[in-house]
Image: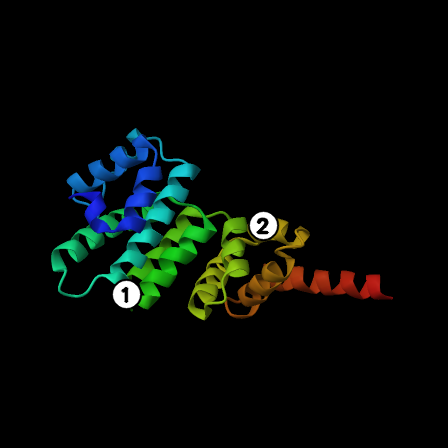
Amino acid sequence: MMIKDLGAGVASVWEGLRPITKKMLVGAMQSGGSNPPVNLVQTFSYDAHADWELSRLLSALDEQSKSFGKKNTEILNEISQLAETCVSVLESQSGSAEVFIQLAERAIKKHDYNKLDKLADRLSDRFSSGEIAEVVRQTDVPQIRAIAYETLALLPVQAILPLLEDPLYSDIAANALEQKAYEYDSAEARDLLDQLDSETEIRND
C-alpha cells in the first residue's frame, strides 16, 4: 500500500505522524488490522499524542473515502483497512471523550450498533467518571448522551460525587444521580439527592 495513493489529505496527515506511530500502525495492520495485539501497542508506548494522531488520521481517511467513486474498490479497501486499524487501536487504548464521540458517531453513521454496544462497554471499563461526563457535555447526539448517562448512573455514588463540585459537570452528575435513584432504584442516590435538595433550600432561605 502506498499512502500517497490514498489521497492528498491522508498523505498529509500520515506525513505528520511520528515514526513510532507509523510503525505501530504498520505492525497492527500486518498482525491482522482489526484486532492488533495489546502487547504490540504497549511495545510502542501508546500515549495521548498517539491518540490525537490516530484520531486525525481516521478523520482524514473517512473524509477521503467520500471522494472516491465506488469503482475505486482497491483504494477504498485500503482506506477501509487502515481506518479499521485506527479504530481498533483507539477502541482498545483511548480514554478520551473526544475520541469516544468520534468512534460512536462513526458507528451510528454506519448503523453498526454492535460496534456501538462494544464502545459502551469500553466506556465503563476504561473511562473515568470525569471523561464520561465530558462525553455528555461535548455531544448533542441523543444515542451517545444516553450511553454516557447510563454508564454514569451505573457507577457507584462515590464515583459520581466529586462531579457535583465541578461547575462543568454538576448538572450532569445530578441528572445521573437522579437516573440512578429512580431507574436503578438506588436508595443511596435518593438519599444524596434529598440531602442536596435540603442544602439548596437552606441556601435559598
Q: Quadrant of residue 68?
A: bottom left
> Depth-wise, is mark 2 or mark 1 nearer the camera?
1
Query: Helix or strand or loop: what does disc 1 sit on?
Result: loop
Q: Measuring 57% from the left and 66% from the top, which residue is drawn there?
A: 181
* Picture layout, residue 1 above or below residue 19: below
Specify the amino acid type for callout 1.
Answer: Asp
Image quadrant in which you'd find residue 188: bottom right
Where does residue 89 sit, x and y in percent of width and height? Answer: 30, 44
Mark 1 neighbour class, 10 Å CA radius: few under 14, some 14 to 19, many 20 or more: few
Toward the viewer: 200 or 60? 60
Question: 151 or 29, which is in the foreground?
Answer: 29
Q: Which residue is mark 1?
A: 112
Rounded to the nearest angstrom, the CA distance separating label 2 from label 1 is 33 Å
Image quadrant occupied by the N terminus: top left
Kindly indicate whether the residue at mark 1 contacts the one at mark 2 (C-beta within 8 angstroms).
Answer: no
x%, y% of residue 107? Answer: 32, 62
In the rendered view, does 79 fall on the left or right side of 91? left
Q: Residue beneath label 2, please?
A: 158
Answer left or right for 39 relative to 59: left
Q: Position of residue 61 (x, y in %)?
A: 29, 53
Residue 198 point in image, percent of width and height: 76, 64
Q: Residue at x 51, y 57 (%)?
A: 152
